[in-house]
């Protein structure tokens, strides 16, 4: 999607964003104000898309042209799809200024009317994307907004990376978000300009989770309930809000000591990985979820004969945290043990 400055909406209020995100929002906004680019990264549900939209609304007015794309897993196999989203509406504006070979390659890739491939038209396509950005930037600053970079089709990622590394002082900035579980965001930096600032979105603290729930109207909640929501969500704002919604819709609140109800929306996130385990391995994790500090010795004592292999498989899938120095097993996220309990 492409948005011209004349048609941009005024910035909306961002109360959800402000809660716990003031410092990183300011840092990202200052980076954009200096003419740099920003890469937001963090796990699913941590608020990357919310921050991305707010930054785009807040800073987009400084750009003459805003190019947007939002990738999805189900469409990541389609070559040039992200490129089509970014340049589809400005193709007529830039094609006339491109050399013939570049124009033909770009039009073929974006419209699907030709047989353009990255292998056959690689150099022409790479230069065409770079030239198109320069043509747009000659008329005024350009902001490229891309969400969920992890699902970007390989062809578009390669072409954008080629252009980003060669823009130099051209007034083109990139504001991107990518889902990461750790610090592996650096593998996405080749698709960004060299001056990109990587901003990691971390978990909210208990006070911030309480403020977020209060803003959404999930009140009144006792301190112990807020503590349980924060612990189960791991400070993830989406998870906390879904847990708060489930409590608000539940006819009865859980008694002290009882696990929180895990809504279907969150359970599905966890169960998709749990389904990759054998039934026996899932039972082993269920036993582990019932203990305060489960160890392999305790699992063996509970009759789980193959605990080592089963927990190793769970760790490989990202369900258990890997810490060889720690004697106790630890779930990678509190929601995993809560979902196991809810499914039992």
Image (cartoon, grey):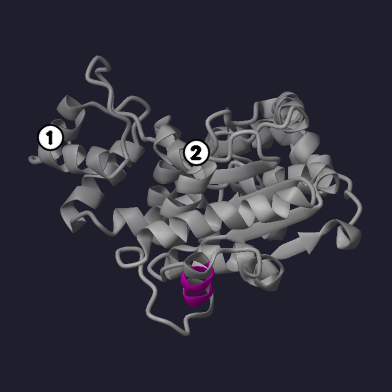
Q: Give the number of the disc on residue 308.
A: 1
Residue 140 falls left or right of residue 95: right
Residue 18 falls left or right of residue 190: right
Name the outermost residue toward the bottom. 113
Tell me where residue 139 appears, x and y as whole percent.
79, 52
Residue 31 falls left or right of residue 46: right
Callouts 2 and 1 close, C-beta under 8 Å = no
Q: Please tell me which residue lies in front, 215 or 287.
A: 215
Can you see residue 205? yes
x 88%, y 63%: residue: 7
x 40%, y 42%: residue: 337
Tell me where residue 142 appears, x and y as whole percent.
72, 48
Which residue is label 2 attached to? Answer: 165
Q: Give the number of the disc on residue 277.
A: none
Q: Secondary structure at mark 1?
A: helix
Q: Is residue 214 magenta?
A: no
- Which span of residues is magenta-colored? 103-108
């Amino acid at each position: 999607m492409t948005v011209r400055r004349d048609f941009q909406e005024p910035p909306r209020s961002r109360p959800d964003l402000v809660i716990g995100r003031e410092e990183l929002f300011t840092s990202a906004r200052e980076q954009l104000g200096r003419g740099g680019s920003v890469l937001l990264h963090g796990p699913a549900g941590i608020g990357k898309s919310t921050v991305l939209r707010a930054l785009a609304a807040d800073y987009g007015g400084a750009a003459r042209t805003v190019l947007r794309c939002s990738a999805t897993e189900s469409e990541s196999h389609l070559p040039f799809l992200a490129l089509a989203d970014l340049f589809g509406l400005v193709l007529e504006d830039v094609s006339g200024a491109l050399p013939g070979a570049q124009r033909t390659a770009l039009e073929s890739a974006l419209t699907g009317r030709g047989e353009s491939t990255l292998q056959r038209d690689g150099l022409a396509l790479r230069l065409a994307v770079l030239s198109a950005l320069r043509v747009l930037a000659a008329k005024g600053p350009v902001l490229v907004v891309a969400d969920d970079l992890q699902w970007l089709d390989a062809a578009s990622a390669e072409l954008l990376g080629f252009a980003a590394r060669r823009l130099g002082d051209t007034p083109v900035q990139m504001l991107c978000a990518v889902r990461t579980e750790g610090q592996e965001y650096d593998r996405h930096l080749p698709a960004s300009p060299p001056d990109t600032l990587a901003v990691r979105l971390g978990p909210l603290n208990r006070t911030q989770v309480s403020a977020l729930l209060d803003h959404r109207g999930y009140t009144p909640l006792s301190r112990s309930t807020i503590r349980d929501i924060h612990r189960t969500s791991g400070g993830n704002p989406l998870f906390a809000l879904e847990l708060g919604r489930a409590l608000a819709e539940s006819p009865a609140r859980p008694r002290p000591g009882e696990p929180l109800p895990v809504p279907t929306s969150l359970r599905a996130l966890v169960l998709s990985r749990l389904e990759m385990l054998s039934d026996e391995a899932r039972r082993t994790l269920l036993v582990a979820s019932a203990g305060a500090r489960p160890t392999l010795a305790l699992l063996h004592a509970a009759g789980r004969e193959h605990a080592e292999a089963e927990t190793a498989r769970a760790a490989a899938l990202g369900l258990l945290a890997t810490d060889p120095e720690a004697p106790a097993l630890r779930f990678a996220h509190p929601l995993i043990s809560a979902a196991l309990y809810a499914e039992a």
